[in-house]
Image (spheres, rainbow, N blue to C red):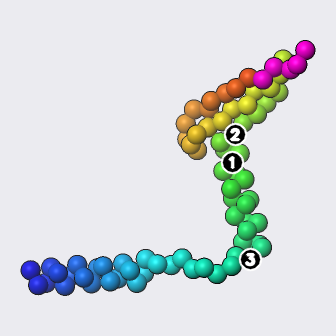
Amino acid sequence: MHKTLLALGLVAGLGLAFGQTASAAPASASALKEAAAVNATIQKAQYAEHRTRHGMVKCYRDFVVGPYRCHYYRNPV
């Protein structure tokens, strides 16, 4: 029992020591631009739009993988 508690305490201590890697340092401008570029590529995967003769079709996905939900917008007459 003593060895079990010692092992669990050691694992918990290591988890606390190495699990907290987030820092509150301000981000640089280049890091923000890179994060925005990565987010833009994900956004492209979840949205599709194309024009037709009668209007526009806009399709969205809730998740990165899955079916599109399409909405049809007609041109005003």
> Which residue is found at the position 9% from the left and 80% from the top?
1
How many numbered callouts?
A: 3
- Please indicate whether residue 33 sits to the left or right of residue 45 in the image: right
The residue identified by callout 1 is 43
Amino acid carrying mark 2 in the image: Tyr
Residue 55 place in picture, x, y as percent = 83, 22
| Residue lying furthest top | 77
Crowding near the residue tagged with mark 3, few <14, some 14–19, many ≥20 C-alpha atoms within 10 Å: few
Of 26 and 30, nearer the camera is 26
In the image, taking residue 10 as reference, residue 68 lies left or right, namely right
Q: Position of residue 2 (x, y in %)?
A: 11, 84
Q: CA distance from mark 2 to mark 1?
A: 6 Å
Residue under pointer 3: 28
Residue 57 colored in magenta in the image = no
Distance Cα–Cα, label 2 vs label 3: 29 Å
Residue beneath label 2, please? Answer: 47
Identify the magenta region.
Answer: 73-77
Front residue of 12/41: it is 12
At mark 2, the secondary structure is: strand
